[in-house]
Image (cartoon, helix red, strand yellow):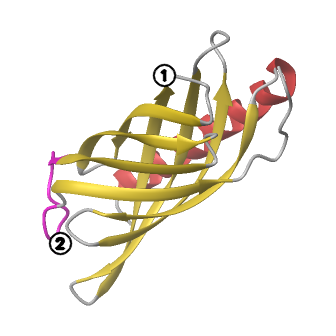
Amino acid sequence: MNKTYILLFFLCVAIQACVAQEAKSNKWIWGPSIGWQYQSGNFLKASGWGLFAPNDHQYIKIDAGANFTWMRDQSTVIPELGLTYYVSTKLIFPFIKAEVTPYTVTPKVGIGLLSIIDLGIGYGFDTRTKDNFKPIQGFTGSVSLNIPLNFHLQ
């Protein structure tokens, strides 16, 4: 297995562990997420996330997970880190997001329904093509379900 994958996997686990620990002491909301994304192909996304409020009107979410796909007659798992900034806390949360994998950088914009269901669009920039795989780049669309495990009111 590639050393980059192993390093990114442990980095994702460490970040998620830190987020979960901080969540217990700093009133973070945290939980798992599952979703779908199209970017040069279909991906199933699974991650853990932590959400906090830097002020009374905005939220920041940090997530670490993996993208699963079947392309070119092979299954592939690609680790991913994401940062989402929700610019409003009304029923509809507009957001800007950045996702980073070993192969792409993908900025997105979108809307979230109370940050539980997120719909995003963006453009992925190929930073390095995976061996025996096609470039992952171009326009992207995604939907995700974020399940809060410790929801509370501020």
Circle 2 residues within 10 Å: few <14, some 14–19, many ≥20: few
Does the magenta run of residues contain 75? no
Q: In the image, residue 127 lies at what x, y percent?
A: 15, 45
Residue 104 drawn above or below residue 38: above
Q: Which residue is mark 1?
A: 87
Q: In the image, residue 132 lies at what x, y percent?
A: 16, 74
| Quadrant hosting residue 57 | top right
**Mark 1 vs 2, N-terminal side:** 1
Assign the N terminus to one quadrant of the image.
Answer: bottom left
Q: Which residue is mark 2?
A: 133
**Tally of numbered tags:** 2
Q: In the image, residue 84 lies at what x, y percent?
A: 47, 32
Assign the C terminus to one quadrant of the image.
Answer: top right
Q: Which residue is at a point 51% across and 62% down the rendered structure image?
A: 35
The amino acid sitting under disc 2 is Phe
Q: Which residue is at a point 19% across and 60% down the rendered structure image?
A: 136
Type of secondary structure dominating the magenta stretch = loop
The amino acid sitting under disc 1 is Val
Viewer-side residue, 153 vs 27: 153
Residue 65 drawn above or below residue 44: above
The CA span between labels 1 and 2 is 36 Å
Locate residue 140 relative to residue 87 in the image: left or right.
left
Viewer-side residue, 146 vs 106: 146
First to last magenta residue range = 125-135
Does the magenta run of residues contain 127? yes
Viewer-side residue, 71 vs 109: 109
The reply to whether callout 1 and callout 2 are in contact (CB within 8 Å) is no
